[in-house]
Amino acid sequence: MKVVQVKDVSSKPNLHGVDARSISDTDSAQVAHITLLPGESLKKHITPVDVVFYVLQGRGVVEIGEEKAEVGVDTLIESPAKIPHRWINESQGPLRILVIKTPRPKEATKMLTEEK
């Protein structure tokens, strides 16, 4: 059995400039823990595989393709492969999200130009 405490995993520098920690990376899937502080967001991007998000703490806005929703704790969101998506924390508190990519990506995530 492998046990991972998120607090024991270091955040790695990333293109989004946020606290993102890889907590599992196997041949079949990747799992990350992302914390967005108030006002922080992920840049719009496209992943080559399906992604499942699970909100652990807080409220945030998730955009997937042309859809946009405000979601909170204990909400699961499915994001199909190759669809632009991002998260925005417009709240006054931290937003913590569990991110599961499956199958494990074999190509890189594609960053998109930010829309203003």
Image (cartoon, grey):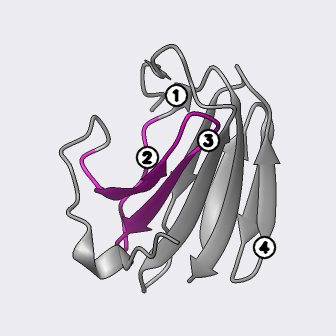
Q: Secondary structure at mark 4?
A: loop
Report the residue marked by disc 3.
29
- Given contact means CB atoms under 8 Å apart, are the residues at marks 4 and 2 in contact? no
Nearer the observer: mark 3 or 1; the answer is 3
Instruction: Kindly identify the residue that appears in the image at 58 percent across and 55 percent down.
Output: 99
The CA distance from mark 1 to mark 2 is 8 Å
Residue 13's spot in the image, x, y percent?
18, 44
Nearer the observer: mark 4 or 2; the answer is 4
Q: Tell me if 25 is positioned left or right of 7 in this view.
A: right
Density class for disc 2 (Cα within 10 Å; few <14, some 14-19, many ≥20) is: some
The CA distance from mark 4 to mark 2 is 18 Å
Location of residue 93 with respect to 40 vertically, above or below = below
Residue 68's spot in the image, x, y percent?
76, 49
Residue 90's spot in the image, x, y percent?
49, 69
Residue kind at label 2, given as amino acid type: Leu
- Given contact means CB atoms under 8 Å apart, are the residues at marks 1 and 2 in contact? yes
Report the residue marked by disc 4.
75
Report the residue marked by disc 1.
45
Report the residue marked by disc 2.
42
Residue kind at label 4, given as amino acid type: Thr
Q: Tell me if 111 is positioned left or right of 70 in this view.
A: left
Question: Which residue, as the protein is rendered here, is positioned at the far front?
Answer: 1
Location of residue 102 with respect to 22 vertically, above or below = above
Residue kind at label 1, given as amino acid type: His
- Indicate the quadrant where residue 105 lies: top right
